[in-house]
Amino acid sequence: MTAVLGDLGTSLAGVKLAAKGKENLWVKRPAVFLFNHQSNADFLIMAKLVCKNTVAITKKELKYSPVGPLFQVAGVVFIDRKNRDKAIEAMKPVIDVLKKGTSVAIAPEGTRSYDY
């Protein structure tokens, strides 16, 4: 489902990607993909690049946003960044996801600030 979100989102936004070394995304799977998240387009680009067989991890606040239902269908793992224990608990299923051969994508520094 991540691939569908990437394809649909980049198409609607008019984003055309030209990636060098894209074949390296498939050399060793499952993998944990870390990406910068400095704009709202970053998630769409990541989803387009890592494509199928990948689950994303995102903040729990997005579960209740307009894109929340799409993320839930895509199997996104929601974490509570304000509660360390809940965040660790939410990450436990990710271990099983990786063991089953599904990759994971996360933007560990995804929060943006206007004041840097």
Image (tube, rainbow, N blue to C red):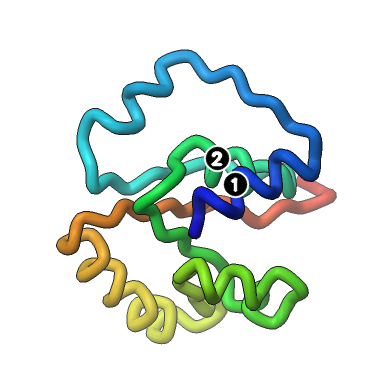
| Residue at 69%, 26% in the rendered image | 16
Q: Mark 2 points at which residue?
A: 48
Q: In which quarter of the image is residue 102?
A: bottom left
Instruction: Return the residue nearer the eye: 27 or 60.
Output: 27
Q: Which amino acid type is marked by label 2? A: Lys
Q: How far apart are marks 1 and 2 (CA)?
A: 4 Å
- Which circle marks residue 6 in the picture? 1
Q: Where residue 115 sits: x, y (%)? A: 82, 49
Secondary element at tag 1: helix
Is 10 left or right of 108, judged from the image as shown? right
| Residue at 41%, 60% in the rendered image | 55
Instruction: Return the residue nearer the eye: 113 or 78.
Output: 78
Q: Where residue 92 sits: x, y (%)? A: 28, 76
Q: Where residue 71 sits: x, y (%)? A: 58, 69
Residue contact at pointers 1 and 2, CB within 8 angstroms: yes
Secondary element at tag 2: helix
Q: In which quarter of the image is residue 7?
A: top right
| Residue at 36%, 54% in the rendered image | 104
Picture quarter with the C terminus: top right
Is residue 22 depicted above or below 74 in this figure? above
- Which circle marks residue 20 in the picture? none
